[in-house]
Image (spheres, grey):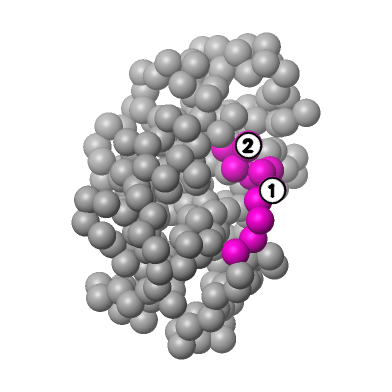
Amino acid sequence: MTKVLVVDDEPALVRTLSINLRARDYEVAHAFDGRTALQCIAEDTPDVVVLDLGLPDIDGVDVIRRVRRTSELPIIVLSARHDSDDKVEALDEGADDYVTKPFGMDELLARVRAAVRRRTVSTPHADPVRTADFALDFAERVALRDGAPVKLTPTEWHLLETLAIRPGRLVSQAVLLREVWGPGYEKDTHYLRVYVAGLRRKLEPDPAAPRYLLTDPGQGYRLVV
């Protein structure tokens, strides 16, 4: 059974989410603050985290940052913060998805299903990629830059692999969003901007003048090696 950890300081919302998730055969744990959430993640190993950013002790973005030091656990942010900078920061720190309050229950449940699917889906691996600056082994999930390990999240691996399967070819924004995040995400192009920028910081020798992860403005991206 898939376990979902719901982290929010609003008891009524936690109760509503728990009822809806359990009705769909999810196991549910909950935490009302960041420290408890981090303890639950360390001890109970949930499959997905639904995380509010406005927690009473530790900011949700800092929770994401701490989780990403050791775990690739899917994280769906649930927040009343509408500012795009907050979304970018959360995604940039490693969140897999972002849902703004108020939200539709069906939408949130669909995003939970998509997060689980991204974690468990088995797809053919792209061939290893080796450049003068970095190397990627998709089968072993090993990334090296200048010989040093680089930690990539599951979403970053999936995005890179979707490009690497088509080396040098333009992959449209809609195809990337559908294959990496799932159906219904084709218009969420800000995800791509944030994740590609993050990958450039991790892999490119000069992120401001990328040599490998290239943008075709308004069209999509390509991996040139």
* Residue holding disc 1: 122
Q: Residue 158's x, y, as percent?
A: 54, 54
Using the image, determine if residue 218 lies above or below residue 215: above
Q: Mark 2 near mark 1, Cβ–Cβ under 8 Å?
A: no
Q: Which label belongs to residue 116?
A: 2
Q: Which residues are magenta?
A: 115-126
Q: Residue 206's x, y, as percent?
A: 31, 79
The image quarter containing residue 59 is: top left
The residue that appears at 44% across and 77% down in the rendered structure is 225
**194 part of magenta stretch:** no
The residue that appears at 59% across and 42% down in the rendered structure is 118
Q: Residue 159's x, y, as percent?
A: 48, 55
Using the image, determine if residue 94 lies above or below residue 31: below
Disc 1, SS: loop
The residue that appears at 31% across and 45% down in the rendered structure is 190
The kind of residue tagged 2 is Val
**In the depicted view, which residue is nearer to us: 46 or 104?**
104
State the quadrant of the N terminus: top right
The image quarter containing residue 120 is: top right
